[in-house]
Image (cartoon, grey):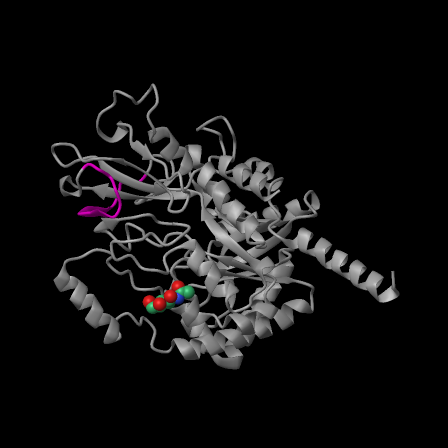
């Protein structure tokens, strides 16, 4: 064999080896510190965290915020983060888990102080950008994190009714063309400002060998805000918030799959409300697949069914009445964690129950294209109707397989504290996390 042939063989082997290492091996674990402060069975402890860490490649601590007056990054829960030293407590786990990258995330829909501070930050010019960048780098370094995650709270896609009579369809058609669906008329300008912020931020972080990750929050339209080809070289990781496409808060009057893999055909649904579309959007702009992570939620979305919603349960379900009541553990309207959903499935202790404790009927999607749902029709008084779109360990595993098949960087889990970390469902602690991990291996 000639030298050059050898060389090309060695080179292609090297490329192949690198490819093997990079593709779909990351499991980015989001940790919302709110979970640490929940009460009772939902309280997530540092012991739980350590059990989870053996499955994660990255741990992202949520969330810091942005000061609306001076654009500095700041703690939005000083009592927990600083006084109780939770930031330092979490990052100190690095000593025992040196292979895991610890990042601090800013935004994540947890920063509710102003509501518009992220757009103001973009518009704040060189001066404001500099203050954000320097303060962010300071905090990341002071608390010994390996990098920063930008989960910027930018304006959302307007929720659009997927159903409707001809009259309202015509109205939405008209709205669309008269610009009512444009939630940000300055989005092109904001996109340019964001590009320069990201580039400058990465340059600053690089001086200290710190990572920069981007998290696209659910329903933030990537076409409007992210100039993918320009920002990708500055980003080590990109997490796509590919869930919560439909929620009882955004779509109170109709229930549908909240995180389908593929476009669910028919019934006037929107083509971009699925994992595959969102991923393709980034891939089509030649963003390296090994930087991209699809997001998987550990919770389900729950709507209240009315008598008029019928009893077939088949989505799109109409005449729903907004968010279902909060679960006994997670205590958030319209949302249930996997442990709570699992306990609503028929079992010996609930099989004869009535009212809010009555079992739900589970409808699994054998194609794994749209997701599973469970429901309980409203009773004769119109009470206790419930419809849940949820992820379970099986469907989460199938999303992980998709990430692997497409040679992505991997998967991002939102978040650890809503997985069944006590093993209430099947005695398996962190069933969602485990199912994903085994599929990525
Ligand atoms: C952004 O919104 C437009 C208009 O609603 C839509 O056509 C497009 O697919 C969206 N982009 C993404 C990445 O979802």
The residue sitting at the front extreme is: 1
Q: What residue sits 37% from the left and 46% below the top?
A: 370
Q: What residue sits 52% from the left and 80% below the top?
A: 127
Left or right: residue 376 versus residue 147 is left
**26 is within the stretch colored magenta:** no
Q: Quadrant of the C terminus?
A: top right
Left or right: residue 12 versus residue 290 is right
Q: Quadrant of the N terminus?
A: bottom right
Left or right: residue 89 versus residue 8 is left
Q: Main secondary structure of the magenta part?
A: loop
Residue 177 at least partly seen:
yes
Which percent across, then down, holds residue 377? Answer: 21, 35
| 181 relative to 410, above or below | below
Magenta stretch, residue numbers: 311-326
**319 is within the stretch colored magenta:** yes
Residue 37 lies in quadrant: top left
Which percent across, then down, holds residue 115? Answer: 37, 65
| 166 relative to 337, above or below | below
Residue 36 at least partly seen:
no
Q: What residue sits 64% from the left and 52% below the top?
A: 101
- The count of marks equals 0
Q: What residue sits 55% from the left and 54% below the top?
A: 406
Which percent across, then down, holds residue 426? Answer: 47, 26
**In-front residue for pair 16/297:** 16
| 59 relative to 138, above or below | above
Ligand 1 sits in which quadrant? bottom left
Which percent across, then down, holds residue 28? Answer: 56, 50
**In-front residue for pair 161/364:** 364
Residue 4 lies in quadrant: bottom right
């Amino acid at each position: 064999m000639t030298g050059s042939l050898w060389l090309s063989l060695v080179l292609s082997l090297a490329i192949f080896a690198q490819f093997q290492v990079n593709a779909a091996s990351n499991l980015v674990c989001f940790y919302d510190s709110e979970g640490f402060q929940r009460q009772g069975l939902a309280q997530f402890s540092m012991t739980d965290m350590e059990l989870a860490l053996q499955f994660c490649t990255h741990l992202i601590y949520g969330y810091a915020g942005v000061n609306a007056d001076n654009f500095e990054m700041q703690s939005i829960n000083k009592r927990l983060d600083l006084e109780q030293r939770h930031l330092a407590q979490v990052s100190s786990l690095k000593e025992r888990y040196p292979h895991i990258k610890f990042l601090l995330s800013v935004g994540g829909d947890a920063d509710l102080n102003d509501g518009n501070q992220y757009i103001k930050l973009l518009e704040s010019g060189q001066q404001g950008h500099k203050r954000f960048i320097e303060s962010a780098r300071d905090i990341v370094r002071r608390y010994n994190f390996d990098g920063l995650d930008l989960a910027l709270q930018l304006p959302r896609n307007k929720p659009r009714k997927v159903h409707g009579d001809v009259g309202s369809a015509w109205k939405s058609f008209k709205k669309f063309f008269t610009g009512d669906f444009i939630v940000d008329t300055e989005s092109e300008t904001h996109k340019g400002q964001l590009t320069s912020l990201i580039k400058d931020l990465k340059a600053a972080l690089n001086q200290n060998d710190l990572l920069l990750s981007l998290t696209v929050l659910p329903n933030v339209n990537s076409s409007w805000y992210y100039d993918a080809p320009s920002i990708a070289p500055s980003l080590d990781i990109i997490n796509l918030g590919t869930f919560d496409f439909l929620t009882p808060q955004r779509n109170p009057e109709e229930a549908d799959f909240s995180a389908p893999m593929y476009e669910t055909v028919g019934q006037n649904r929107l083509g971009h409300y699925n994992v595959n579309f969102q991923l393709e959007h980034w891939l089509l702009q030649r963003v390296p697949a090994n930087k991209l992570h699809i997001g998987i939620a550990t919770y389900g979305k729950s709507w209240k069914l009315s008598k008029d919603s019928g009893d077939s349960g088949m989505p799109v379900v109409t005449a729903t009445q907004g968010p279902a009541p909060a679960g006994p553990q997670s205590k958030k309207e319209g949302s249930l964690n996997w442990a709570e959903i699992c306990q609503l499935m028929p079992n010996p202790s609930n099989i004869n129950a009535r009212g809010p404790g009555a079992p739900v009927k589970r409808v699994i999607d054998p194609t794994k294209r749209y997701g599973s749902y469970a429901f309980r029709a409203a009773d004769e008084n119109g009470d206790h109707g419930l419809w849940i779109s949820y992820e379970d360990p099986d469907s989460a595993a199938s999303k992980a397989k998709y990430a692997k098949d497409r040679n992505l960087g991997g998967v991002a889990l939102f978040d650890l504290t809503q997985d069944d970390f006590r093993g209430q469902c099947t005695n398996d602690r962190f069933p969602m996390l485990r199912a994903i991990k085994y599929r990525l291996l």
